[in-house]
Image (spheres, rainbow, N blue to C red):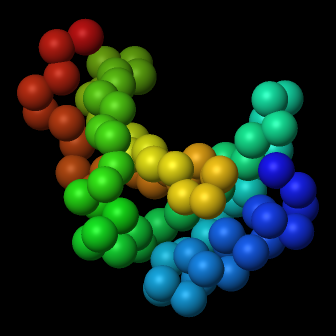
Amino acid sequence: MTDREATHVIKKLRQYGCDVLTAVKTPRCRVVIRIAKPTSEMAVRATPIHQRLNGVPSVVYTMQLDGCIIQWNGGEPCNHCNH
């Protein structure tokens, strides 16, 4: 993943109306982009990750877009986490 390709994905996300919060290149040459305001189509395609930190449950959503990993926090806490 080149910086140019990642920049293209970030521009695409902004065109979709997403707020890009951060973009970080991982050691495996992937780019993880954290966003707010995903589109409804993105929400349908995403994989929910249920987690619990210090006893507080939450959901993080993740999906791939043009070679980048897109992540965002769920709006409501996860009330059915069993960890």
Viewer-proximal residue, 4 or 59?
A: 4
Viewer-proximal residue, 53 or 3?
A: 3
Q: Residue at the far right: name it.
A: 3
Image quadrant occupied by the C terminus: top left
Q: Say which residue appears at 30% left-offset and 39% top-offset.
A: 48
Residue 23, percent across and down? Answer: 74, 56
Q: Say which residue appears at 41% left-offset and 72% top-offset.
A: 37
Residue 51 appears left or right of 68: left
Viewer-proximal residue, 19 or 47?
A: 47
Q: Residue at the far top: name it.
A: 83
In the displayed structure, would residue 35 be above or below residue 40?
above
Residue 39, percent across and down? Answer: 35, 74
In the displayed structure, would residue 14 be above or below residue 78?
below
Q: Say which residue appears at 12% left-offset and 33% top-offset.
A: 79
Q: Is residue 79 visible?
A: yes
Residue 70 appears left or right of 21: left
Q: Residue at the far left: name it.
A: 80
Residue 13 appears left or right of 77: right
